[in-house]
Image (cartoon, grey):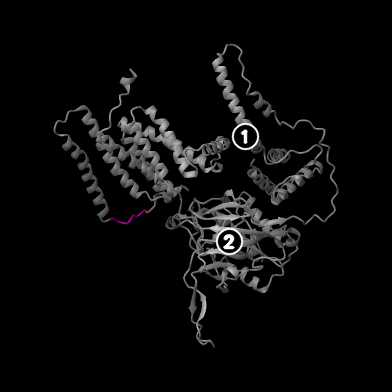
């Protein structure tokens, strides 16, 4: 009976033609991924689509194809992410480890935190199942029309609501779908009728006639005169968007020298710019600008220096001075399509060495600390009227892009005491160039800045107040796609602060720089790249960072007397590039806070008993009926395997569970949230010793200085609440919440 229900037939020429048209239709579904997402290459997905169609077409039993399909997915993952031989087991172990590690993220739907291997594996499996179902319905059941209509609707929606031009795809889908319908109809006719001597003629009519109809229709539509649309974009009209936004269109994020017109939406671009090897994760500085026009930024004062022997040139205190620093060494390697004639460096540059090509020279903008690479040296004619009429050697006028280079730099570690006491004695040239504002700047921008900083007596405290307001007030949303463009004559900062309330780094950084200028605090706008994504480390422990076009970023530098330019971060989704040494109150005498003896406590507080429920959940009741011993063996084996995996991953599971409980608590339950944070710290690092206070435990942890400083601050707040009976001030609530969020996100076993 089963054999009669499914009787496999050798595929005919018509079946193969149908399979070709189906593949072309599936290709239209995949093409938008490269423009709308960070998908790099589409060939693995094309391979899956083609292989599934061929297997379902030529293999006699559908169930027989699934092992081969899964093997093909494994081969694609191996080809994309692993360098070892396919027959070695190490990469399979690594793949399994990645998937197990990401399972809690799947359950919590945190797709962005999953590894690229797990995300690709899940997408490949989903694609495999979906194409198998579509192949069955279209090629075997001959249900073609619904898939053609769905493809047209899919492309029309993308063309209407997304930054994707689907005009060509819609026309191609019409062509492929029409032909697929014709071939499916012919296949059905030939299966129920005998066409002796007429099969070739029938095939020609079925293929040629639709081609002629489509060719004539598309040709007329393309060549016929067309009247301009009186209603160019009805969707924007219905959604309340103005035509200015439509005219600008969607941009791709990336580093660009033209910043005269900021605003508008953009889409993420995952193109690799460079790979960096560094001992310190930091922003990669490229350039700065000082004139705010109301619409964007431009360069004002410039002072250029020609550097002909770059490898022997050294810079000193070009950005900041009089502060503690950390030495940074980094190597940058450019191999992708995006390369720039600008040198990117962390913190404050000291030296550039080991660059390729070796004939590179530099034009250095001493006012904005930008290095522009030139293609070697040339003879330059002296200015007219010069005493010496002999040609001089200078950098070439042609730009050049370096393939790789090493930089030596330093990042500041700023004393909170020193920066708070820096004062307002700014040099006259700093006041002249870095307090500029357009005359048409709306007064309410300054009024808002004054309101935010009314309780801040020093420039540094004003800087921090505005920075925290933009980052942590919750009033402004980080957004990249639904971002309006200012109308003609409308101020960019004013629109963001009082109307749209959404934007990306350009909005946050420009708003901070402009508001500080209204308070007579010198600022400038800086651009470059965020640190990027860590993908590994070398033998000496240096981080390997991949910096992509989507990591292009802008931030703010603020000038402090006797210190120089210090960077600050106003965008909420980025980490501040400045390190603060919190020494402002360390010299003041503090009354000792009595702490209870924690040494007599037994087991850890188990909260509301949920851990007890979890531990009891594994118990299997066998009352009421007798289970066969074979089932018991299988269950015990499965439980043993699950228990082994859970034991190996006990830290990940514990942190996931604690983080889930932490997220369920209200923000005003600070003491409970702090306890859970410390329990997570114990799971990752080391447990508290008997009789050890919270402060002693934090000081003993082997963690970075930034994390230790954050934990000390949170511990001090906790001690004040518990033992000093003091609540958290409103001003400190946002800071506390931000620090706790950041620490929990960074906790990894």
**Can residue 149 be seen in the rendering of this structure?**
yes
Residue 268 locus on image (x, y percent): 49, 51
How crowded pointer 1 is (Cα within 10 Å; few <14, some 14-19, many 20+) is rated as: some
Residue 152 locus on image (x, y percent):
35, 42
Are the residues tagged 1 and 2 within 8 Å (C-beta)? Answer: no
Q: Is residue 129 visible?
A: no
From this view, report whether residue 191 is shown above or below residue 556: above
Q: For numbered disc 1, what is the local secondary structure?
A: loop
State whether residue 38 is above or below residue 126.
below
Q: Left of 291 or right of it: where is 609?
A: right
Going by the image, does 585 lie left or right of 316? right
Residue 230 included in the magenta stretch of the image = yes
* Count of residue discs: 2
The residue shown at (36%, 41%) is 26
Image quarter where the C terminus lies is top right
Question: What percent of the width, then of the height, locates residue 674?
Answer: 72, 41
Pointer 2: what residue?
Answer: 406
Q: Which corner quadrant of the image does residue 687 belong to?
A: top right
**Image height check: is 107 above or below 251?**
above
The N terminus - image quarter: top left
Q: Is residue 611 magenta?
A: no
Q: Is residue 185 left or right of residue 298?
A: left
Q: Position of residue 649 (x, y in %)?
A: 62, 34
Q: Residues within 10 Å of mark 2 (few under 14, many from 20)?
A: many
* Residue that appears at 58% across and 55% down: 277
Magenta-colored span: 226-231
Residue tagged by mark 1?
649
Residue placed furthest toward the top = 625
What is the magenta segment's predominant secondary structure?
loop
| Earlier residue among tags 1 and 2 | 2
For the residue pair 115 and 638, the one nearer the viewer reads as: 638
């Amino acid at each position: 009976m089963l054999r009669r229900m499914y009787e496999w037939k050798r595929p005919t020429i018509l079946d193969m033609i149908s399979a070709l048209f189906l593949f072309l239709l599936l290709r239209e579904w995949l093409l938008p991924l490269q423009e709308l997402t960070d998908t790099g290459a589409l060939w693995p997905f094309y391979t899956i689509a083609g292989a599934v169609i061929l297997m379902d077409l030529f293999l006699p039993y559908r169930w027989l194809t699934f092992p081969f399909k899964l093997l093909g997915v494994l081969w694609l993952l191996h080809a994309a992410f692993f360098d070892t031989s396919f027959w070695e087991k190490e990469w399979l172990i690594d793949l399994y480890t990645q998937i197990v590690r990401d399972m809690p993220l799947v359950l919590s739907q945190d797709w962005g935190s999953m590894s690229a291997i797990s995300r690709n594996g899940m997408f490949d499996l989903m694609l495999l199942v979906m194409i198998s179902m579509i192949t069955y319905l279209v090629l075997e059941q001959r249900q073609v029309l619904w898939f053609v209509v769905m493809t047209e609707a899919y492309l029309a929606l993308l063309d209407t609501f997304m930054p994707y031009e689907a005009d060509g795809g819609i026309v191609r889908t019409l062509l492929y779908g029409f032909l697929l319908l014709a071939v499916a109809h012919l296949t059905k006719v030939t299966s129920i009728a005998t066409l002796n001597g007429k099969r070739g003629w029938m095939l020609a009519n079925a293929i040629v006639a639709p081609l002629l109809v489509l060719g004539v229709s598309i040709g007329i539509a393309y060549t016929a005169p067309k009247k301009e649309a009186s209603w160019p974009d009805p969707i924007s009209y219905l959604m309340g968007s103005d035509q200015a936004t439509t005219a600008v269109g969607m941009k791709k994020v990336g580093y660009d020298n033209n910043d005269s017109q900021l605003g508008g939406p953009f889409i993420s671009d995952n193109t690799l710019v460079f790979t960096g090897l560094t001992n310190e994760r930091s922003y990669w500085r490229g350039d700065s600008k000082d004139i705010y026009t109301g619409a964007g930024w431009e360069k004002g004062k410039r002072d250029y220096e020609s550097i002909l022997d770059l490898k022997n040139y050294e810079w000193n205190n070009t950005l900041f001075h009089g502060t503690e620093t950390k030495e940074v060494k980094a190597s940058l390697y450019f191999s992708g399509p995006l390369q720039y004639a600008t040198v990117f460096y962390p913190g404050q540059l000291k030296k550039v060495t080991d660059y390729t090509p070796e004939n590179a020279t530099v034009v250095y903008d001493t006012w904005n600390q930008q290095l522009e690479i030139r293609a070697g040296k040339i003879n330059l004619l002296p200015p007219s009227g010069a005493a010496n009429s002999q040609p001089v050697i200078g950098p070439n006028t042609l730009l050049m892009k370096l393939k790789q280079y090493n930089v030596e730099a330093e990042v500041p570690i700023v004393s909170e005491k020193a920066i708070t006491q820096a004062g307002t004695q700014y040099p006259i040239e700093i006041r002249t160039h870095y307090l500029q504002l357009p005359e048409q700047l709306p007064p309410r921008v300054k009024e808002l800045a004054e309101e935010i900083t009314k309780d801040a007596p020093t420039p540094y405290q004003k800087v921090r107040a505005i920075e925290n307001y933009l980052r942590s007030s919750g009033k402004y949303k980080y957004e990249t796609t639904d971002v309006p463009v200012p109308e003609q004559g409308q101020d960019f900062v004013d629109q963001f602060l009082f109307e749209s309330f959404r934007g990306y780094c350009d909005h946050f950084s420009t708003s901070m720089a402009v508001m500080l200028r209204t308070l007579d605090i010198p600022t400038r706008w800086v651009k470059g790249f965020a640190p990027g994504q860590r993908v590994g480390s070398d033998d000496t422990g240096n981080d390997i960072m991949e910096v992509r076009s989507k990591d292009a970023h802008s931030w703010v530098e603020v000038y402090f007397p006797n210190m120089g330019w210090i960077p600050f971060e106003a965008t909420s989704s980025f980490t501040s590039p400045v390190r603060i040494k919190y020494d402002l109150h360390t010299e003041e005498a503090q009354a000792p806070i009595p702490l209870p003896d924690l040494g007599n406590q037994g087991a850890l507080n188990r909260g509301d008993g949920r851990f007890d429920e979890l531990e009891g959940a594994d118990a299997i009741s066998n009352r009421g009926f007798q289970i066969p011993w074979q089932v018991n063996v299988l269950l015990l084996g499965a439980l043993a395997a699950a228990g082994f995996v859970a034991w190996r991953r006990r830290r990940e599971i514990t942190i996931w569970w604690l983080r889930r409980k932490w997220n369920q608590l209200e923000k005003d339950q600070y003491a409970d949230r702090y306890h859970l944070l410390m329990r997570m710290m114990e799971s990752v690092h080391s447990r508290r010793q008997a009789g050890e206070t919270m402060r002693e435990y934090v000081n003993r942890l082997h963690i970075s200085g930034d994390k230790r400083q954050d934990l000390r601050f949170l511990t001090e707040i906790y001690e004040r609440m518990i033992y000093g009976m003091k609540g958290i001030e409103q001003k400190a609530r946002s800071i506390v919440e931000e620090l706790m969020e950041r620490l929990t996100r960074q906790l990894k076993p």
